[in-house]
Image (cartoon, rainbow, N blue to C red):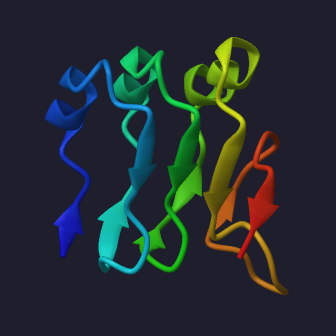
């Protein structure tokens, strides 16, 4: 419950990061761009709003294979041009 702490970006060897179904709110921290070892990031089924930062989308070029957010449906909460799946 609450905001996604930007300090999580210090976990720079993290490869799989599942944060779905945690009632997280606010926006996705731009600092997540530091998670360069990430291959999977799931942020779906939360209360996150706004856009996935371009810097996070850029991780798709360096190995991020799965990026999931609440960008689907009639009134999506999140705008995401780089997500591999929208919930």
- Say left or right for 26 vs 28: left
Q: Quadrant of residue 81?
A: top right
Q: At 22% from the left edge and 59% from the top edge, which residue is drawn?
A: 3
Examine the rendered structure and indicate whether residue 33 appears above or below residue 6. Answer: above
Q: Which residue extends farthest bottom? A: 74
Q: Quadrant of residue 13?
A: top left
Q: At 43% from the left edge and 71% from the top edge, which residue is drawn?
A: 20
Is 3 or 61 nearer to us in this picture?
A: 61
Label count reads 0
Residue 28 at x, y percent in the picture? 43, 46
- Say left or right for 69 vs 35: right
Q: Quadrant of residue 87?
A: bottom right
Q: At 30% from the left edge and 77% from the top edge, which residue is drawn?
A: 22
Q: At 56% from the left edge and 55% from the top edge, which residue is drawn?
A: 50
Is 6 or 50 nearer to us in this picture?
A: 6
- Say left or right for 75 vs 34: right
Residue 15 at x, y percent in the picture? 44, 32
Examine the rendered structure and indicate whether residue 2 appears above or below residue 65. Answer: below
């Amino acid at each position: 419950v609450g905001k996604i702490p930007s300090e999580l970006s210090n976990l720079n060897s993290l490869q799989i990061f599942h944060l779905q179904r945690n009632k997280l709110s606010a926006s996705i921290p731009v600092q997540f761009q530091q998670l360069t070892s990430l291959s999977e990031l799931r942020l779906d089924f939360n209360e996150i709003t706004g856009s996935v930062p371009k810097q996070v989308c850029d991780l798709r070029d360096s190995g991020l294979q799965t990026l999931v957010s609440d960008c689907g449906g009639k009134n999506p909460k999140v705008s995401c041009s780089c997500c591999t799946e929208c919930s």
